[in-house]
Image (spheres, rainbow, N blue to C red):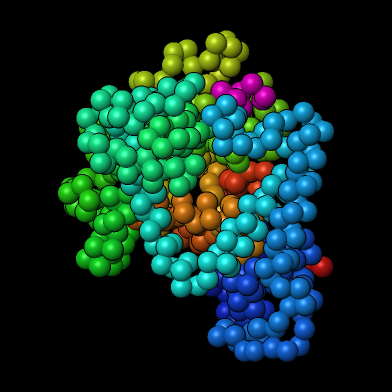
Amino acid sequence: MTKLRMPWGRKPSTDPSTNDPDAEVKKQNRQSFSGLRSLINWDTETPIEQKDSATSAPNGISNKVQEVSQLISLAKKIGAEAEKLEAYLKENGLPDPSFGVDAPGDFPKLSEEAQRSRLEIADATKELGDLVRGPRENVRWGVWSFLDTLSLQIVNNYGIAKLVPLDKPIALAELQTKTTLDPVNLARILRHNMTNHVFCEPTPGFIAHTASSRLLAQDGPLQDWVGFNSEDIFPAAASVLSAIKTYPEATSLTRTGFNVAFDTVDKEPMFATFGKDPARAKRMGGAMASLTGGEGYEVRHFVDSYDLSEIDEKAGVLVDIGGSHGFVCTDLAKKWKKMKFVVQDLPKTVDSAPKPISDDESVAERVELQAHDFFQEQPVKGADVYYFRWILHNYSAPYAIKLLKNLVPALKPGARIVINDHCLQEPGTENPWDEKLMRSMDMVMLCLLNAQERTEDEFRELFRAADERFVFKGASRSSGCRMSIIEAVWNPEPVEVVEVEEK
Ligand SMILES: C[S@@+](CC[C@H](N)C(=O)[O-])C[C@H]1O[C@@H](n2cnc3c(N)ncnc32)[C@H](O)[C@@H]1O
């Protein structure tokens, strides 16, 4: 029997000994503090010094008056970090951030320290803005954020950005002659977008580009991103309430907000709907390319950080399940010169993959494409790694467990199961930018598929529910990457869990 040593920090959440009252208090405190971000110095995770003239907050934590008001400390932080960032940009000959039409579409690549300043500025400005708007106004206007989606949806669908010259303003009256969008709607949609720095009106009645509207004219994947989000996800989001009220278990792939919005309840999952509509499928593909080309999602994070040396040494095999056109495996094959790769996807995707899969012959000969439905038993037996990237988060637990169970007949002892997905942290411990992004992605998964992003414990639980012989190894994440690597190893021997105290 294999003895598995598990430090207390890694115990399954179902373990009754987690009912330790002290641990529970600490956990509650952590959660409470997460709502009071500005009381915490995130570098040291210690509360900023406070005076004692306290009032009691609704969560029971004393709401002490700070020596320096939150207003001023945030403003100072923004000033200080902005100076650091500007100095870095100047030292490195990088352009000042700007909304101007010629501004770069992406923020320049920064050193780790400059990036930290950038994130601090983004977080503190959001917090300061929320603070000075006040609680009621925050809620009142926060719930209107869907109107930002609406105005982008219409601009994007009508291709308005392409009708505005890149080098000079155009009279609104002339722009109106170039589109079927009626004059009143054209003007108000543009002016709503302008409140988000998308287009500008340098003189009354004349429309010009900003950097963002220019990208909407030029960047195909960004157009797809706006189209997919505003025309597929946005209606789905508006129907989630109806879906979860009618089907409260909220796990089915055919009872989602998307199904309600597009009248496919109990008929077909979103992927099947897209499979019948090439234009819509292409738009979703472009949207995914826009996302994965963005900060923190680059494939290089996995390629650079995940160690396959042992497997490469023995010319082992990695299977990329739902691997699309194999872009991860071709990059891996460039780094690991002996291993072989099998990329599995649905027949249509496999058929549309480039042939050869890579211009580099030594890569192409080691990457095989294979049609396989991951809801069926895994046909590649005895591989060293079974890899899922952006797959598990598309499925609620019953489906995700099935995907893992389908591997079991193929697994040899020591086979690794590697999931590359978001892994949610304790609320308030992620940097706020990433936290908002990941929790928004979690909501998107709900809207479309009744699926979810998961915490490490939730991944552990998936493996446990699929088969007790999966030995969960945990989650890790490289610096600058939003995706985690979650790993388990197949151990067909029974495992006895021995608790050891963490040093
Ligand atoms: C979100 S994409 C992820 C693609 C790729 N792994 C990546 O990291 O970008 C999901 C992929 O799963 C594939 N897929 C969906 N259903 C599948 C099924 N039943 N069997 C195999 N592949 C499937 C899709 O065709 C698509 O390529």
From the image, give the main secondary structure of the stretch colored magenta. Answer: helix
Residue 225 at least partly seen:
no
Q: Position of residue 37 (x, y in %)?
A: 65, 68
Identity of the residue drawn at 71% across and 44% down: 115
Q: Is residue 331 magenta?
A: yes
Of 201 and 99, the residue lying toward us: 201
Of 90 and 377, the residue lying toward us: 90
Identity of the residue drawn at 55% across and 85% down: 58
Residue 144 at least partly seen:
yes
Classify 331 as above or below 107: above
Identity of the residue drawn at 49% across and 57% down: 439
Identity of the residue drawn at 47% across and 45% down: 196
Q: Where is residue 159 in the image (x, y as percent from the top left)?
A: 33, 29
424 on left or right of 314: left
Classify 275 as above or below 43: above
175 on left or right of 121: left
Q: In which quarter of the image is the C terminus?
A: bottom right
Q: Is residue 332 magenta?
A: yes
User: What segment is highlighted magenta in the picture?
Assistant: 329-336
Q: Position of residue 315 (x, y in %)?
A: 64, 25
In the rendered image, which quarter is residue 303 located in? top right
Classify 124 as above or below 119: below
313 on left or right of 410: right
Q: Position of residue 457 (x, y in %)?
A: 56, 62
364 on left or right of 241: right
Classify 41 as above or below 116: below
